[in-house]
Amino acid sequence: MNISVPHDKRANKLKSTRIAGKLVNDYWQMVWRAKEEGKLICWYEGSAINPFLEAADICWVHGEAYSAMLAARHQEVKAQQAAEERGYMKELCSYARTHLGCAVSNQRTRNDTDTGIAFGPEDDDLSAKLPPPDMIISAYAYCSTGQQWDEMTSRVFGKKIPIFNVSLPWIWGAKKDAGYLRGQEWEETSRYVERQLYDMVKFIEERTGKPYPWDRLRAMMADIRRASELRLEAMELCTNTPAPASFFDWVVSIAPINNLPVDGVVQYFETVLAEVKARVAAGEGAVPTEKYRLFFDGIMNWNKVGWLAEKFARYDANVVAGRYTHMAFWQEPSLINPQDPVLGMAQNYLICPNNHASPILIDLIMGLCEKFKVDGMVIHASRTCRAFTNPQFLIADAAHKRLGLQTSMFEGDVTDESFYKDELLNSRVEAMFEAIDSRRLLV
Amino acid sequence: MKQHVMGIDFGSTTAKTVILDLKGRMVASRVSHMGAVSGDGVKDSVAGALEDAGLTQADIGRTVSTGYGRRMLDIADKNFTEITCHARGAVSMVPDARLVIDIGGQDSKVISVDSNGLVAQFAMNDRCAAGTGKFLEALARAMEVQLDDMGDIALEATQTLKISSMCATFAETEVISLLAEGQTKPDVLGAVHAAIAARTLGLVGRVGKKGPVVMTGGVARNPAAVHHIEKALGMPLILPETPQIAGALGAALIALDDYRAEHKLAISEADDDAMDRQMAEDKACIPGCKGVPGSMVVEPALPAKGKLGRLLGAIQNNL
């Protein structure tokens, strides 16, 4: 075939990201023990409000993170089946479906509603191991399912769990002075969310019965700001050719910056940055031969992270940047003032990449494509995440018309593997590489 | 050096084979229905094309495969995707084409082609068999009509019905319901073809509508599909004489490029002999020379008349 796919070519993943795997395991072990240790438990989805919770010594369970972890371990099906038995259809966001399945499984296996301690006939059944929530906080940008998901969780637990809602308005970007991080709408929306976060802290104080430890939050946000700066610096080094790390390395590094305990996050990204710098110095790339540089638009297929990393490496394709990794997860550290962090936290929640009007979103993506000197764009249309897929035809059109990039779209899903068809991806991606090759010959 | 190349399109419902000589002339083509698993169809297609050309596989210098089964063929030297091959084949059939609509058995695709005949952008059905040949096959079975007759029957429709589901399975349910309501087969089939056209229009929108538009693939032989797509597009479709073989032809042309490039410094014994004969006929000094043109032969200047002329003539004769 024209597009070479030798099976001996392997992705050269960052060694330091293995630490992320350990940190993830340690964190979930802590979560599974939390009820026995007498901790309050909060379930939440979407925005990274976990520093607010961690500072107050509340154990936090991020729904997408748990679903993603199950999918990455290929243990998601049992939870999804439990959700479907309860009536949640297959078209529902598979993050939500998986997490709701965990709630259903938890309810089925709880022996005593007073203690809420979960047990199951099989100790390795992770779908039933989550401790039930003592509170739910809903703070979801853009995604309407996210807000309903929390209501559904509440219903699974008999509507006995107190919920606090934080409304994160969509950034329309329609006013004359509107733009990325600027304009009247941006200022007003930021303040609106900031006020709600202070109200959320009062809700937390009511649950814990203690004054909120602001000093702990400030210290944590100083660490998160530093970790984010290190992460962005390492990502920036991938403008080098060959790029020393890939989109998939940054996918694996989402958990440390987004939902793991803050302690250790700075060291993690210092280690990652050191390895990336060493690779740049040695001219070492994330794939053995970097023939194509790609941008990945779309949310991650969590049961395919390693699979896709290896697949693109075999194609000599280095996926050097992506919307999911480069435009989310505390991506604007300069907005965070560690001495007074709440406004900057609100603003980082607001700039979830799906929460912008398409013109702003597309400008940001085109900027990344130019900065990382990509040859093409591979687009993952997630079957059950319409929030991410809605603007993808517009993005593809802009990539083609503004930058002359080839694009290729394939369907999959965040945690439901049944929507992914390998041959569909192969055909579309190979066609894109063939088109890139033919243009190079012409030049 | 061998004198022929082959392109094979190993599709989901049919296998197509094209054999070209080294001047790019088609010497044989064959379309066979197939069992995708057994691969009998593709074997039949290749064997038939070779037989028609009076060749054996050993006579083929380069073989390129395409289609969903492209990697399964041991005889293929290289394989390319349907996008690349259909674009190449369609543009060779209709050289000024700028948009290629190909509806095959398992997928439908729209390819935008630039002025160099290269793929500028493409879109394919992403999610299911909606709008493909399989969709038509399923509905032909449900309506108990022959696949080849569907188009002609659909053109007899007298009223506009709507098939709202693009899922092949649910569309089958809708079709059966419409028939149960007493709707006629032509009217229902008209709706089926309009649904395919609507789906195709969506793909066209993704790559940009422009013309001339050429339609390839087996569904291009269906007059109702062509009619409804033309109506939806508001543009005429150019139909090659053999739309089904566009992918195989594109594969064969890529094989030809590849084989020529590899052998650009080689010359076969037969070609060498032919060149010798041609040079002798042309009285040529180097290959390609057509001899010395008459206009370039300078006749000796005639001696000028008169005293001076005679004198010059005498001098020249004595030199």
Image: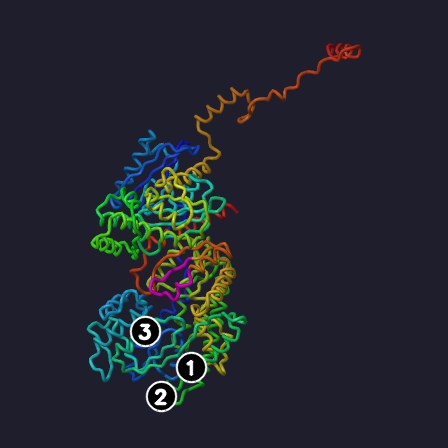
Q: Upstream in the sequence, badge 3 or badge 1?
A: 3
Is residue A155 found left or right of A183 in the rendered image? Answer: left
Q: Which residue is mark 1?
A: A197
In the image as oriented, which residue stretches furthest toward the right? B307
Foreground disc of the pair 2, 3: 3
| Residue in the image at 44% along x and 80% along y | A220
Density class for disc 3 (Cα within 10 Å; few <14, some 14-19, many ≥20) is many
Q: Chain of mark 3?
A: A
Secondary element at tag 1: helix
Distance from the alpha carbon under mark 2 to that under mark 1: 14 Å
**Nearer to us in this view, B229 or A402:** B229
Q: Is residue A126 visible?
A: no
On residue A149, which mark appears? 3
Dots 2 and 3 on the same chain: yes
Q: Is residue A423 visible?
A: yes
- Residue A296, relative to residue B149: is it above or below? below
- Residue B10, relative to residue A312: is it above or below? above
- Residue A274, relative to residue B163: is it above or below? below
Q: Which residue is mark 2?
A: A206
Secondary element at tag 2: helix
Quadrant location of residue A103?
bottom left
Q: Residue A442, percent across and down?
A: 51, 45
Queried whether the magenta region covers residue A379, the answer comes back as yes
Distance from the alpha carbon under mark 3 to that under mark 1: 20 Å
As shown in the figure, which amino acid type bears the numbered disc 3? Answer: Trp
Q: Upstream in the sequence, badge 2 or badge 3?
A: 3
Q: Chain of mark 1?
A: A
Residue interval drawn in magenta: A378-392
As shown in the figure, which amino acid type bears the numbered disc 1? Answer: Leu
Which quadrant would the N terminus of chain A be assigned to in this image? top left
Density class for disc 2 (Cα within 10 Å; few <14, some 14-19, many ≥20) is few
